[in-house]
Image (cartoon, helix red, strand yellow):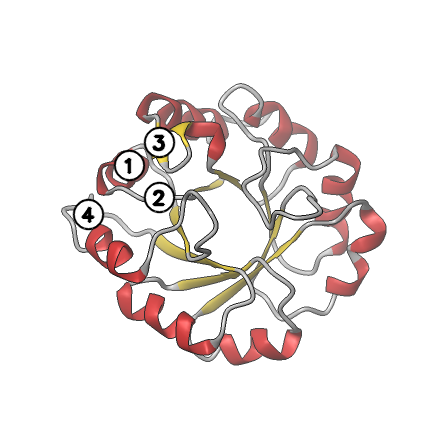
Amino acid sequence: MFVKICGITRSEDAVVALEASADAIGFVSYPPSPRYAPPEKVAAILSARLPQKKFLAVGVFVNPDIKLLKEYIDAGVNVIQLHGDESAEFALEAAELATVWKAVRPRDKTELAPFANFPADKFLVDAHHDSMPGGTGLQVAIETALAAVGILPRPVVLAGGLTPGNVAATIAAVRPAGVDVSGGVETRPGVKNHELIRRFVAEAKSPVP
């Protein structure tokens, strides 16, 4: 099971996530977020003494321009996660710089169809919120998550409201390709709880019954 720990703002949290066998760590480029990490902070974290293992460094963007993408790629990001209202045309342009994932926030399964031809390597399915692009702590309805796995043309990473206590059951019910967590492993926004990270990764990677 692919596991991403998102909203990293401190090098010590990145170290623990990777030591716990997370496959990716995420950095939020959206300034209104309490988990915002500017490019210079991302560069400092990624140049710190991190575990010597292969992992993805994912930049999370909300309606960015190409200049911002390049700043984060220069900082060490190697995956672009589009979390706003970006067009397919913009995604193709971004894909010339790095791997592109697309986050979708459907109210229900009827809102998944427009993404069936969206050019992305992975889809991250998050809970809908009228004003916040992510990090709400809300869970996607199981019916909608199941529909996403069936409708979207690329692997689905499930996000939104996951915790060490519910991730194993959610994986068993939905069977996504991966899971993404931020608030569910935090002491407060932007500050990760190391024991919760370890428990989350262990639960997510445990055998699915």
Q: Are marks 4 and 1 in contact (CB under 8 Å)?
A: no
Of circles 2 and 4, which is in front?
A: 2
Could you tell me if residue 203 is visible in this image? yes
139, above or below 45, in the image: above
Which badge, 2 or 3, is on the more N-terminal residue?
A: 2
Quickly name the residue at label 1: 13
Secondary structure beneath label 3: strand
Quickly name the residue at label 2: 8
Q: Disc 3 versus disc 1: distance between alpha carbons?
A: 6 Å
Q: Disc 4 versus disc 1: distance between alpha carbons?
A: 15 Å
* Kind of residue sitting beneath label 4: Gln
Which badge, 4 or 3, is on the more N-terminal residue?
A: 4
Residue at the extreme top = 165
Please tell me which residue is depicted at 26% across the width and 35% down the height of the picture: 19
Residue 10, how many percent across, how many down? 26, 41
Q: Are marks 2 and 3 in contact (CB under 8 Å)?
A: yes
- Mark seen at residue 52: 4
Residue at the extreme left = 49
Q: Are marks 2 and 1 in contact (CB under 8 Å)?
A: yes
Q: Disc 2 versus disc 3: distance between alpha carbons?
A: 8 Å
Residue 183, how many percent across, how many down? 48, 33
Quickly name the residue at label 3: 192
Q: Are marks 3 and 1 in contact (CB under 8 Å)?
A: yes
Residue 135, how many percent across, how many down? 54, 41
